[in-house]
Amino acid sequence: MTSETTFEDGAVQREAPAWGAVFALTLCVATLIASEFMPVSLLTPIAADLHITEGQAGQAIAVSGIFAVLASLLISRATRGIDRRTVLLSLTVLMMASGLIVALAPNEAIFMAGRALIGIVIGGFWSMSAATAMRLVPETQVPRALAIFNGGNALATTIAAPLGSFLGQYIGWRGAFFSVVPLAALALAWQFLTLPSMSAADDSRRGSVFGILRLPKVGLGMIAVAFFFMGQFALFTYVRPFLEAVTHVSLSTLSSLLLIMGIAGLLGTSFIGLLLKTRLYGLLIAMPLFMALIATGLILFGGAVPAVAALLAGWGLIGTAAPVGWWTWLSKMLPDDAERGGGLMVAIIQLAITLGATIGGFFYDGSGYQNTFSVSATILCASSLLAYWAWRASCRSPKDEAAVDRPALHT
């Protein structure tokens, strides 16, 4: 007989782990993230085929971000009372539909509609990820399940850009987007076979998701998160046009540089966990500062391939690892309200990605890469300052101070 744990909100956690479901969802997450970031390496051919500017093509990420924000804030209420298994399977079907629509899009409007669908899936999946992990495995194994999810995220972030560039070179940008459809179908079948029924939690007693922002330590941290992702994607979205127009690389070299950045990101994600135990706030403050320096270095040495390769490796190393730091921060700040906090953080991150891609596109089309990268560096510096203020806010009461690792405060 399977024993169960019932949470305060009515959700049920099974003591027998459903690792098959965890890996099925990991495949779904990896496919989803690959779909989200594939436009980064395909802006040039997308723009040429749809007869739009590269800045306008970059809004493909902005559009998906807008709908991810809406989905992350609304999905819990919109699906109240619906089995979470049904919700997750439905989101996977939407991901397949998005891939088909984007791959077959005859014009910009249809292309953006497909990107809107992937945004809904992004917001829905990430908002439910932590809560789903808690219901698939026993409490002691939740960190492992979340680490597997994040591993799928890191792997997809690593391969999305170089794989998109490689596939685009041989089968075109439409073929690259269509390639996610069979992966999504596989994820759908795997989830159908392994996901258990998960009744919807009772959130009727919960307040507004924005209520947690009244805590200064949380509010400042969330703003720091927003500035970090805004600064990151103001630059990252336009890496391919920069490499082609400034560094003057071939398609094969472009794919290699993006792969280097991705591999560095995998390494960063693998090792940051060793430092977060004692260096949480030190890392949250330092990482955006280093990325600002890298953005400046790309302006100064953008014409030298070896220098650009080294700088992009540093960008991948830090930029892919940083979200792990912020999710760890959230678990420490809101250990008893992680579901609402996770939904809010997803919304903030996606809104920040949207704003970053929009701001970057505006400056890239209007005044070139130098101003785009300078704006990115400025926003990242602001994130570092806000992270410092969030640390100070967490020290103002014994209760707040206990929520983080004290050694990290002096890093």
Image (spheres, rainbow, N blue to C red):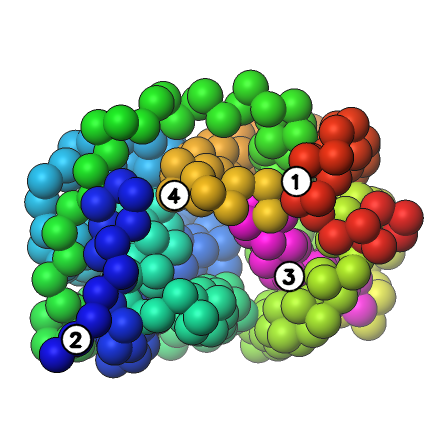
Name the disc covering residue 339, or none. Answer: 4
- Give how far apart the Cα atoms at labels 4 and 1 are: 22 Å
Look at the picture and state if 128 lies above or below 66.
Answer: below
Closest to the observer, 45 or 193: 193
* Structural distance between the alpha carbons of marks 3 and 2: 37 Å
Q: Amino acid at mark 2?
A: Thr
Q: Earlier in the sequence, mark 2 or mark 4?
A: 2
Q: Residue at x 29, y 49 (%)?
A: 7
The image quarter containing residue 226 is: top right
Q: Which residues are magenta?
A: 310-331
Earlier residue among tags 3 and 2: 2
Mark 1 residue type: Phe
| Numbered disc 4: secondary structure | helix
Q: In whole angstroms, how far apart are the C-alphas of marks 2 and 1?
A: 43 Å
Q: Which residue is mark 3?
A: 321
Name the residue tied to disc 2. 2
Check if residue 248 falls in the magenta segment.
Answer: no
